[in-house]
């Protein structure tokens, strides 16, 4: 039987212990996380470039809830539960499109872009008054630097308040307002969603697992800073290196910045041409996660430099996915029930403390 030493003392230093591994393998924990983490936090659902014109909409899923985001005739972007107030049918089936009015496919109720009921054909005359206030139910929605967030918790603190100066930091990238959401890729990862966040929040593994990353970025000056409900890792490109094919003298931004926002969002900005990517780890179940990777550039016709950047990011990501899938095998093992953090893994400590607090442990 394996023995377990709860505290590791080495050279008089005590290392903190990680989350216990049952939090990565227990279906009951996943169920609790849906309510206590994902239904109570700001979740990225899209970008303003997806709803540039009145009537443009997209649908998505947040913590199992169907959501509809659209721009009204008054130019206001709104989010609703994508659920018909007559008898619950999912209202809009398409992933995205443009509509003048939303129509339910069951009994034909129709709704204006601002969520107000237009017509309820099976309620006429006197009956019509009884249902006239049955509009779509709104969801908390806020926009930061073009990113559209939704929060299912009506009592949640405002987006800007939750993430401190994160949006101010983003605003320092002068090109951000010009970026459009160019494409999105998804990948099913056979690991708990937290394993990928853990992986993202430290770079101890970079020397071992990411040869292209450490060849390009100056790891001696790699920084990890924990902030209010988010953290940031930053480095600059080595003086003798190029990022993809970019001549860094002409690059719009020369350092890399890699943000994590509680609970499951990562925002990365690489050196080189104007770019941003978001990565979301959306749990499918306790041991399966949908990785959602979205790229933002100025134009959908990517230049060679931009394509190289995507290739670089995808290479690093593939290396990480393999690692977390191997880690999940070990989480299930009886060999150990907990790990330890190195002193350069403080951003993981922050994340794990937030998980424990959210779960009331
Ligand atoms: S459920 Fe939508 S119109 Fe009846
Ligand atoms: Fe990595």
Image (cartoon, helix red, strand yellow):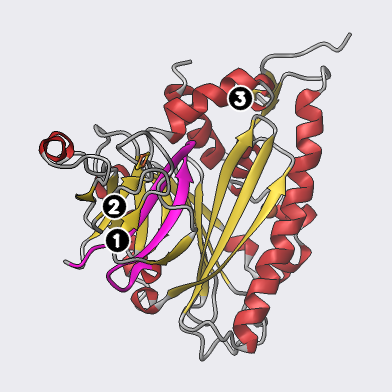
Closest to the observer, 238 or 285: 285
Q: Earlier in the sequence, mark 3 or mark 2?
A: 3
Instruction: Mark 1 vs mark 3: give the one in front.
Output: 1
Magenta span contains residue 54: yes
Where, by quadrant of the figure, is residue 114 drawn? bottom left
Q: Is residue 238 above or below residue 343?
A: below
Closest to the observer, 312 or 37: 37
Magenta span contains residue 195: no
Image spot of residue 225 (x, y percent): 46, 49
Tag 2 secondary structure? strand
Taking the spot 35% from the left edge, 54% from the top edge, the residue there is 103
Taking the spot 61% from the left edge, 40% from the top edge, the residue there is 198
Residue 285 is marked as none
Instruction: Locate ligand 1 by image quadrant.
Output: top left
Q: Which residue is mark 2?
A: 110
Image spot of residue 179 (x, y percent): 42, 76
Taking the spot 81% from the left edge, 32% from the top edge, the residue there is 329
Q: CA distance from mark 1 to mark 2?
A: 7 Å
Farthest residue, direction top? 1
Q: Is residue 156 above or below residue 163?
A: above
Residue 19 is marked as 3
Q: Answer left or right for 200 relative to 125.
A: right
Q: Earlier in the sequence, mark 1 or mark 3?
A: 3
**Stretch in magenta:** 51-73
Closest to the observer, 90 or 137: 90
Q: How many C-alpha atoms fall within 10 Å of the one at disc 2: few (<14), some, or many (≥20)?
A: many
Cβ atoms under marks 1 and 2 closer than 8 Å: yes
Residue 101 is marked as 1
Q: Answer left or right for 170 relative to 270.
A: left
Q: Earlier in the sequence, mark 1 or mark 2?
A: 1
Q: Quadrant of the N terminus?
A: top right
Secondary structure mainly formed by the magenta segment: strand
């Amino acid at each position: 039987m394996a023995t377990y030493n709860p505290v590791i003392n080495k050279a008089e230093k005590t290392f903190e212990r990680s989350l216990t591994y049952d939090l990565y393998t227990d279906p009951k924990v996943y169920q609790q996380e849906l309510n206590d983490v994902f239904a109570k936090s700001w979740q990225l659902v899209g970008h303003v470039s997806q709803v540039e014109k009145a009537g443009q909409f997209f649908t998505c899923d947040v913590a199992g809830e169907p959501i509809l985001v659209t721009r009204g005739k008054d130019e206001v972007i709104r989010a609703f539960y994508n659920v018909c107030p007559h008898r619950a049918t999912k209202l809009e089936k398409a992933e995205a499109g443009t509509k003048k009015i939303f129509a339910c496919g069951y009994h034909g109720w129709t709704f204006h872009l601002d969520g107000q009921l237009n017509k309820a054909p099976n309620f006429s005359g006197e009956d019509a008054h009884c249902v006239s206030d049955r509009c779509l139910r709104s969801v908390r929605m806020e926009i930061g630097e073009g990113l559209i967030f939704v929060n299912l918790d009506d009592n949640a603190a405002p987006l800007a308040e939750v993430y401190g100066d994160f949006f101010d930091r983003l605003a320092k990238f002068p090109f951000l307002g010009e970026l459009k959401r160019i494409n999105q890729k998804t990948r099913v990862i056979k690991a708990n969603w937290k394993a990928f966040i853990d992986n993202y929040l430290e770079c101890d593994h970079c020397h071992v697992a990411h040869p292209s990353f450490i060849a390009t970025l100056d790891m001696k000056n790699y920084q990890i800073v924990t902030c209010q409900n988010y953290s940031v890792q930053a480095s600059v490109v080595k003086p003798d290196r190029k990022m993809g094919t970019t001549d860094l003298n002409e690059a719009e931004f020369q350092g890399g910045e890699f943000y994590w926002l509680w609970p499951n969002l990562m925002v990365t900005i690489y050196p080189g041409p104007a770019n941003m990517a978001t990565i979301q780890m959306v749990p499918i179940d306790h041991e399966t996660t949908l990785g959602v990777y979205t790229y933002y550039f100025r134009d959908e016709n990517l230049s060679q430099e931009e394509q190289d950047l995507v290739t670089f990011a995808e290479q690093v990501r593939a290396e990480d996915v393999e690692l977390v899938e191997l880690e999940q095998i070990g989480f299930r093992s009886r060999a150990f029930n907990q790990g330890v953090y190195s002193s350069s893994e403080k951003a993981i400590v922050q994340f794990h403390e937030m998980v424990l607090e959210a779960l009331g442990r």
